[in-house]
Amino acid sequence: CQHDFFLTKGGISVNIGNHMSLCRLASGGMIAIDGIVLDAEAETELQFLTQNGVLLEAVIFTHPFHSLGINWFHERYPPGIDKHSPKWYGCPRHLKIAPHISWTGSLGDCKIRQLFEPELQMRIPSGAEFVDPMPPSSNHFSSVLVFHKTSRCVHCDDTLLFFDNPSVLMKVFGFKDGSMHFHPSMKSQ
């Protein structure tokens, strides 16, 4: 699911986009990865696909600094209400900034990342600061990479960037249609 997301700096707004993934497990259950604020049409589709949230087994947030969708998703799919409530997993920073949520576990724990194997494989790139990325204002490189074996899709939030039809402004900065890049916070020495 992709949606608009506007970044505004110095009075200039650029649509950098936003996304989340929904994976179906062999059990028929589903996992939402990096929930975002959805418009009415997308929310209706998510409700349909998850049978009003009943099939939603887990909500996973993989990027330490991406948190805008957490409260919106929590209002609609809170953990611990009944046996159909999803379990919530996040990065150490999510657990710290959203203590009002009954998190089931931290993706900083290898055992938590292995819970949905072999269907979902989650990895944190070696050598990247994940628990407390510095400087927090710009270090958005590290996140949990999620591979859904059945669909052979990788969900990656910001570590790798793929540009499909970038805006004119993005093209000015060198991003071409069909190009893939590391997040700009990864600077070579």
Image (cartoon, rainbow, N blue to C red):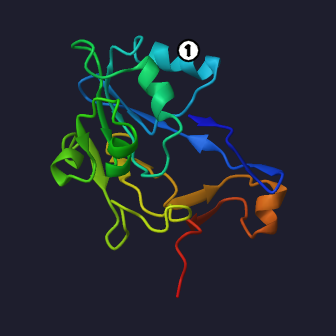
Q: Position of residue 85 (x, y in %)?
A: 29, 18
Secondary structure type for disc 1 = helix
Q: Is residue 99 above or below residue 159?
A: above
**Residue 163 sits in quarter:** bottom right
**Residue 45 sits in quarter:** top right
Name which residue lies at 82% across and 67% down: 172
How packed mark 1 is, by other alpha carbons closer than 10 Å (few <14, some 14-19, many 20 or more), is few
Q: Which residue is label 1 attached to?
A: 44
Q: Is residue 60 above or below residue 73?
A: below
Q: Nearer the viewer, residue 39 or 133?
A: 133
Q: Is residue 185 above or below residue 155?
A: below
Q: Position of residue 56 (x, y in %)?
A: 34, 22
Name which residue lies at 26% across and 53% down: 108
Name which residue lies at 25% across and 29% down: 26
Q: Position of residue 93 (x, y in %)?
A: 37, 50
Q: Nearer the viewer, residue 91 or 19?
A: 91
Quadrant position of the N terminus in the picture: top right
Amino acid residing under circle 1: Thr
Q: How many marks?
A: 1
Q: Position of residue 173 (x, y in %)?
A: 76, 69
Q: Nearer the viewer, residue 106 or 30?
A: 106
Q: Is residue 1 above or below residue 65?
A: above
